[in-house]
Image: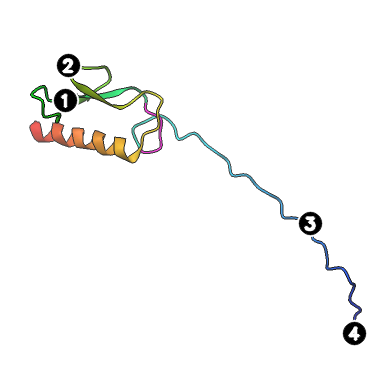
Amino acid sequence: MAARGSKPEETAPAATVRTQEYDAGVGWDVGQTAPEDAYRALDAAGTGSPTGPVVSSHPGGYARLIVAKGAVVTDGVKRELDAAEADKTEQG
């Protein structure tokens, strides 16, 4: 029978490997950086409903900034952009 030492075997800690981080890139998908501002006009009748297409500069009157250039596109931003696109295709 082999003799046991009084100290437990010391093992070297496992090497820590950092994951490589990549930029998500520029685009309109979730997690990417918005390439430009995205605004959508609001109904001037006072209902506050979004109308018209998404544009890159303030359309004048009442409008909502959906996302600013250089900001990360979130799920909410993507939903608003998709809703504007759906409205656009329904109208014509």
Marks 4 and 1, how far apart at CA? 85 Å
The mark lying in front, picked from 4 and 2, is 2
Range shown magenta: 30-34
Q: Which mark is residue 42?
A: 1
Q: Which mark is residue 12?
A: 3
Marks 2 and 3, how far apart at CA? 66 Å
Amino acid type indicated by mark 2: Gly
In the picture of the structure, the residue carrying the numbered disc 4 is: 1
The stretch drawn in magenta includes residue 31 = yes
Q: Residues within 10 Å of mark 2 (few under 14, many from 20)?
A: few
Q: Magenta-highlighted stretch: main secondary structure?
A: loop
Q: Residues within 10 Å of mark 4 (few under 14, many from 20)?
A: few
- Whether tag 1 and tag 2 are in contact, CB under 8 A, the answer is yes
The mark lying in front, picked from 3 and 1, is 1
- Whether tag 4 and tag 2 are in contact, CB under 8 A, the answer is no
In the picture provided, is 28 more to the left or to the right than 46? right
Q: Secondary structure at mark 1?
A: strand
Q: Secondary structure at mark 2?
A: loop
In the picture provided, is 5 more to the left or to the right than 32? right
Q: Position of residue 8 (x, y in %)?
A: 83, 68
Marks 4 and 2, how far apart at CA? 89 Å
Amino acid type indicated by mark 4: Met
In the picture of the structure, the residue carrying the numbered disc 2 is: 61
